[in-house]
Image (spheres, rainbow, N blue to C red):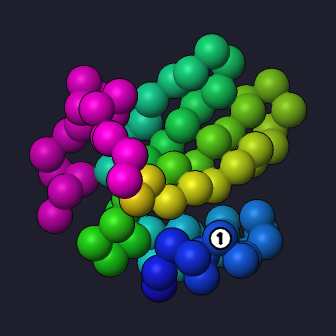
Amino acid sequence: MKPIDFDKLSLDEKAKLILSKGVYVSKSEFFQLEISLYRIENDFVELWYEPITGRVMRIDYLKGKKVNPYLKHLCASNLN
């Protein structure tokens, strides 16, 4: 799926796509948010989750953005 098509999906549709086709890679934190990195085909997707409210705040393709914040949390077994 192309990022432009992904952007047209609702938040719920994006979450379902990640659950069905995504592969968990790593997690990072930003203030009180948990940001999980998933791989869908050859691209990376971020899922922003707020543990206090139990809500997914946003889901974005990382096209053109760096994955550096995840490198310190990266486990090689998640890359297969």
Nearest the viewer among 54 and 33 is: 33
Residue 5 x, y percent position in the rendering: 60, 82
Which amino acid type corresponds to the residue marked 1 in the rendered image?
A: Asp
In screen coordinates, is 39 left or right of 75?
right
Quarter placement of the C terminus:
bottom left
Residue at position x 45%, y 29% in the image: 28
Q: Is residue 68 magenta?
A: yes
Q: What's the residue at 85%, 32% (across, down)?
A: 53
Residue 51 seen from this side: yes
Given the current orientation, which residue lies at the most extreme top position?
31
Residue span colored magenta: 64-80
| Residue 78 is one of the magenta-drawn residues | yes
Q: Is residue 64 above or below residue 23?
A: above
Image quarter of residue 23: bottom left
Residue located 32% across and 41% down the image: 66
Please state the horizontal and vertical placement of residue 41, each as a whole percent of the image. Answer: 32, 77
Q: State the image coordinates of residue 51 (x, y, percent, origin top left).
A: 73, 30
In the picture of the structure, the residue carrying the numbered disc 1 is 7
* Residue drawn at point x = 28 percent, y = 32 percent: 68
Mark 1 closeness class: few <14, some 14–19, many ≥20 residues within 10 Å: few
* Residue 23 at least partly seen: no
- What secondary structure is found at the residue carrying circle 1? helix
